[in-house]
Amino acid sequence: MEVIQTAIAGLLMIQPRVFEDERGYFFETFSLKAFEEKVGNTVFVQDNESRSRYGVLRGLHFQKPPFAQAKLVRVVKGRVLDVAVDIRKDSPTFGSHLAVELSEENKTQLFIPRGFAHGYVVLSDEAIFQYKCDNYYTPTHEGAIRWNDPALHIDWQLSPSDIILSNKDNNNPFLCDIY
C-alpha cells in the first residue's frame, strides 16, 4: 500500500496495491502489520457500513473526547465525495478540510485521525460506504458541524437542492458554536 500525506497533518490517503487480470481484481483492504508500519499503532474495534442513494449527505460527525474516533474509510460500490475537517483547536490547520473522491474504481482509502469531523455525499446513483473505527460509538459524546457552514468553504460538488439530509444533520451547529 502507498500512504500519501495530505496538507493536513495526520490525514492520510491510502492507495492499496490492486492486482487485476481477466478474472477481475484482488487487493488487501487492511493489514494490521502494514498499517502499523506505514501509519502507526491504531487498533480498530468497530466496522460500519452504510448504503445511500444519490445526494445523501451524512455528516459532518465526530465523537467528543474521551470517546473520539479515528476512522479508516472506503467505498465498496459507487462514488462519494469524502470530507474531513480538522477540529483540533491547537492545530495550525484548525477549520481546514480535505475533500477527496472515494470510489469503487479508485479503491482509495482515507485515514482520519481523532480530532476531525467527517462526512460524505453520494455522487453516484447508490454508494456502499465502509469504515473502521478505533473507538466505540458513544451517543452521549456525539458531535456534529453543519454541512454548509460558510466558514468551512466546502464544495460538495452538488447543487444544494440535490442534497438529502437527515433532520438531525440539517440542524447541526456551526464550527464556531462547538467550542
Image: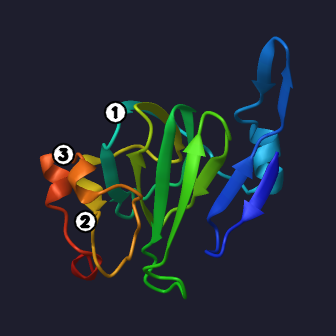
Residue 128 vs 90, above or below: the answer is above
- Distance between mark 3 and mark 1 Cα atoms: 13 Å
Q: Which mark is residue 19?
A: none
x and y, in percent, of residue 106 in the image: 68, 41
x and y, in percent, of residue 170 in the image: 16, 56
The quarter holding residue 154 reads: bottom left
Quadrant in which the C terminus appears: bottom left
Give the side of residue 121 with respect to residue 7, left or right.
left
Q: Do the residues labelled 1 and 2 touch (CB within 8 Å)?
A: no
Q: Which residue is drawn at 41% across and 43% down?
A: 136
Quadrant in which the N terminus appears: top right
x and y, in percent, of residue 112 in the image: 56, 58
* Whether residue 40 can be seen here: yes
Q: Crowding near pointer 1: few (<14 within 10 Å), some, many (20+)?
A: some
> Hey, which residue is sitting farthest top in the picture?
23
Give the side of residue 8 with respect to residue 70, left or right.
right
Q: Which mark is residue 146?
A: 2
Q: Residue at x 34, y 59 (%)?
A: 60
Return the residue nearer the eye: 38 or 26.
26
Return the residue nearer the eye: 146 or 68.
146
* Whether residue 163 can be seen here: no
Residue type at numbered disc 2 = Arg
Secondary structure beneath disc 1? Answer: strand
